[in-house]
Amino acid sequence: MTGAAANGPMMRTLGGEAVWPPPVWLMRQAGRYLPEYRALRAQAGSFLALCLDPARAAEATVQPVRRFGMDAAILFSDILILPWALGWGLEFREGEGPVLPRFAGEADLARLEPGRVAAAVAPVLETIARVRAALAPDVALLGFAGAPFTVAAYMIEGGGARDFARARAMAQAEPGLFGRLMALLEEATGRYLSAQIAAGVDAVMVFDSWAGLLSPRLFARHAVTPMAGVAALLAQRHPGVPVIGFPRLAGSMLGGYARALPLAAIGLDTGADLEVALGLLGAGTAGQGNLDPAALLAGGRALAEETAAILAAARGRRFVFNLGHGVLPETPPAHVGELIARVRAG
């Protein structure tokens, strides 16, 4: 972490200070709602090509910070870059999203090659170096990865799904196979995030977008335990570098997740009652969230009221203002500017 970044509001908050107004950045702040991003995406030819083009991926990362002045930039990439780097197939189809081969058995596990990850993600690490050089020194740069369960879910389903029933069924019916896949992904995720930190990110975030679909028993086994392993590896290799967890849809399981894990912050989804959730996190963990992306899309009175309610609940606490999920593609850029101004006003 650079000295200047350590003095910026994002890193001060992650480091234990209650900063006001709170730092603000947005999940999917780089993306289709920005015309400059759409132009960049058209130049790249495909989403995957954009993720693996250091110059264009760095530009995509910096675009929203340049336009709106967020307190953090998050690396432009995708959580499925890791399975791709392990040798698993991946394409992004227009109107359909990610498409992968379906992971189904021991033979598929043998196809995964942890030894090829370092070379495969070299363009991502170059992107990090380019972004750090382009950002103002006090703007934090966040790296990220998908949590093992969420990545496994996409691999087993062969893409996105409404309830990831195939993945959840494998966890129940074939715990040995599922556990071996999870162990491989846990190790690979920790190493990938470690490489991002070595390349220049100031903190990392782990997205467990579908963890809340698990039963409490399996949530403890497949969301909490792997996250603990990733956090332990990073603490050993990079002591003091903050880690943010995002166990989306965790609901009543949030408290156990917070108590079990040594995280600098935990992301809260749109459905979390902020007063209750912040109480569950305890004094040692900052909250991050949790504006409804639909309020940002709507703008006007809805945005004003929802933003004010979150700020009121967060006042006096360690808090990072964000969304409860990512920016919707249809969001007018002017609404994002309005949101940043409201947060800055406190």
Image (cartoon, rainbow, N blue to C red):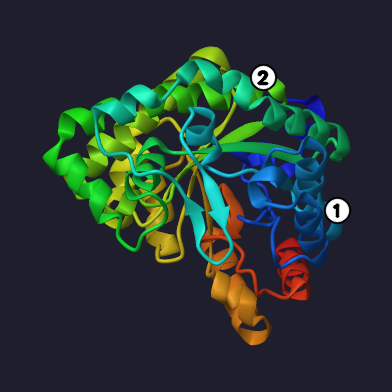
Residue 129 appears in view: yes
Q: Secondary structure at mark 1?
A: helix
Q: From mark 2 to mark 1, how far is it between C-alphas?
A: 25 Å
Could you say which disc has been placed on residue 150 in the image? none
Q: Nearer the viewer, residue 54 or 16?
A: 54
Q: Which residue is mark 1?
A: 66
Q: Which residue is mark 2?
A: 198
Numbered marks: total: 2
Write down the quadrant of residue 251 in the picture. Answer: bottom left
Report the residue at 64% width, 24% height from top: 197
How far across and how far down the image is residue 332, in percent? 73, 76
Report the residue at 48% width, 27% height from top: 86
Report the residue at 67% width, 19% height from top: 198
Q: Is residue 203 above or below residue 218?
A: above
Q: Nearer the viewer, residue 138 or 199?
A: 199
Type of amino acid at the residue the image marks with label 1: Arg
